[in-house]
């Protein structure tokens, strides 16, 4: 096992070690204190959408166990907590009245973090769109971008004075492609045209959100969290190499291009631009406002080969087999070098600000035995990816922090509660939390920070 103190020596003293969660995955209390349904409440309650028809009604009961969970975070010795704010708690119908009780909950959360000396990294949108907005087309409707702008302004006006950083969106790749093209996430669409509309509206909402945040708190560091994909070609053939380049544009460039360059990738526009919604004057300027930081959520590489079938739609790729023989319990290939390759490639392609690894972790479903959870594979996974992060810092990349996904086992979207990513085990029958072996190790590592060898730059 990698000694946490030895690993700590590879990081600068002001490197931030944290843990991450998302509102819908842990809070529960879906009908309490004025919250109204989100698209995930509706999606979860439809047969065949989520494993076992699991839903977020109770989840980890975090809404009712806030103080105990804040104590848990403090006991891990981490310096920062990344959480998301539930739009349906703040503006329950997406537009219309603001719900003070919802804001009160996040007041308590942020104040609780401050009282414990823990930095607050908030995410404004982690997929729980107020269900009422779906009636107007949800993320395919331009009006949703303006509803998001108002929500962002409302949340930051109330909480922004105590936040250390804020992200507009978490993984828009998921809420665009997984939700509107592949049908795996809410609202469960399988429609390229809907996905292309959702893409531009989401990018626009991000830009409008950045402006709203800065109008309220000009000094609050604003970022965007992207689950960028390291796209590897399945072979050395020219066709597969070209497929990997198309996949890079389709899965990464459609977000990084507009945000960091003010333009969609040319290959993407030439193939699908005629099916995009109207890009109105000023849209790209709004989307490409400079950011203070960006977050990378990384778990596994994407391997692709060329799809030779007639009429294959851009990016015209097929999955290629994994290279590593290790997989997590959710079936994802474990290949840490991809994290380094991805950061290098993205920084070569775009002028990027400081980076935080905002999610990284592994699904292993070990249970409690004799009061312990021996999840050595998760510990090894985290240590290996932190090693790659340290390498990147050594190469001069501005990696500023790492958030383990997740603080605790939770509602894993379409997989329900059967897949566990936590460094803390949750017994869903009793809500008992048990810090896993990986959590104890991560706490020892985090406990070394912040320390004395701060940068002088």
Image (cartoon, grey):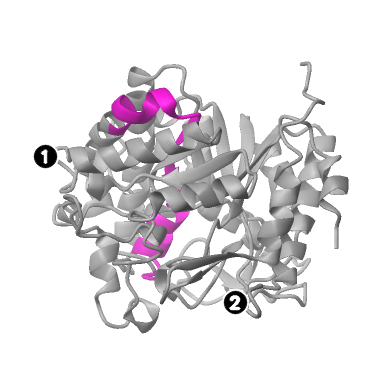
Task: Judge whether residue 259 can be spotted in this image.
Answer: no
* 408 or 270, nearer to the observer: 408
- Please give left or right for residue 51 compared with residue 244 in the image: left
At x 34% / y 54%, what residue is drawn? Answer: 63
- Please give left or right for residue 347 compared with residue 45 in the image: right
Q: Is residue 400 above or below residue 237?
A: above
Q: Position of residue 93 (x, y in %)?
A: 15, 48
Quarter of the image where one finds residue 151? top left
Q: Position of residue 70 (x, y in %)?
A: 48, 47
Q: Residues within 10 Å of mark 1 (few under 14, many from 20)?
A: few
Q: Which residue is mark 1?
A: 96
- Which contiguous range is marked in magenta? 155-184
Q: Position of residue 298 (x, y in %)?
A: 62, 55
Does residue 166 show up magenta in the picture? yes
Q: Which residue is mark 2?
A: 365
Pick out the residue farthest to the left. Answer: 96
- Please give left or right for residue 437 compared with residue 79 in the image: right
Does residue 427 show up magenta in the picture? no
Q: Is residue 128 above or below residue 259?
A: below
Q: Secondary structure at mark 2?
A: loop
- Please give left or right for residue 58 compared with residue 308 in the image: left
Q: Is residue 35 above or below residue 166?
A: below
Quarter of the image where one finds residue 377? bottom right
């Amino acid at each position: 096992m990698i000694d946490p103190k030895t690993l700590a020596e590879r990081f600068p003293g002001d490197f931030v070690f944290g843990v991450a969660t998302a509102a819908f995955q842990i809070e529960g209390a879906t009908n309490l204190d004025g919250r109204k349904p989100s698209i995930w409440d509706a999606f979860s309650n439809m047969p065949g959408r989520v494993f076992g028809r699991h839903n977020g009604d109770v989840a980890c009961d975090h809404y009712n166990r806030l103080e105990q969970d804040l104590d848990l975070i403090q006991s891990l010795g981490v310096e920062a907590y990344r959480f998301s704010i539930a739009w349906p708690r703040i503006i329950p119908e997406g537009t219309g009245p603001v719900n003070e009780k919802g804001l009160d909950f996040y007041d308590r959360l942020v104040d609780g973090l401050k009282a414990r000396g823990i930095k607050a990294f908030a995410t404004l949108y982690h997929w729980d769109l107020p269900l009422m907005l779906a009636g107007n087309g949800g993320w395919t409707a331009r009006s949703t971008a303006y509803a998001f702008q108002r929500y962002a302004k409302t949340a930051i006006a109330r909480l922004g004075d105590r936040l250390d950083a804020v992200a507009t969106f978490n993984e828009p790749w998921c809420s665009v492609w997984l939700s509107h093209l592949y049908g795996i996430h809410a609202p469960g669409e399988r429609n390229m045209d809907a996905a292309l509309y959702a893409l531009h509206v989401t990018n626009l909402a991000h830009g409008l959100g950045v402006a709203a945040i800065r109008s309220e708190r000009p000094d609050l560091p604003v970022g965007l969290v992207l689950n960028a994909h390291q796209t590897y070609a399945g072979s050395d053939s020219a066709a597969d190499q070209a497929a990997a380049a198309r996949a890079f544009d389709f899965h990464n460039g459609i977000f990084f291009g507009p945000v960091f360059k003010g333009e969609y990738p040319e290959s993407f526009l030439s193939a699908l631009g005629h099916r995009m919604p109207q890009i109105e004057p000023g849209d790209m300027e709004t989307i490409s406002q400079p950011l203070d930081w960006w977050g990378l959520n990384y778990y596994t590489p994407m391997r692709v080969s060329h799809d030779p079938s007639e009429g294959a739609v851009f990016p015209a790729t097929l999955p290629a087999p994994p290279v590593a023989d290790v997989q997590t319990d959710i079936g994802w290939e474990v290949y840490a070098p991809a994290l380094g390759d991805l950061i290098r490639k993205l920084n070569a392609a775009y002028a990027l600000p400081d980076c935080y690894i905002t999610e990284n972790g592994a699904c292993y479903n070990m249970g409690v035995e004799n009061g312990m959870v021996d999840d050595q594979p998760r510990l090894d996974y985290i240590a290996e990816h932190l090693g790659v992060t340290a390498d990147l810092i050594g190469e001069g990349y501005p990696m500023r922090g790492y958030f383990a996904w997740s603080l605790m086992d939770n509602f894993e979207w379409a997989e329900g509660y059967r897949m566990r990513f936590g460094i803390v085990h949750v017994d869903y029958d009793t809500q008992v939390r048990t810090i896993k072996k990986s959590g104890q190790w991560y706490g020892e590592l985090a406990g070394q920070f912040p320390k004395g060898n701060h940068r002088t730059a």
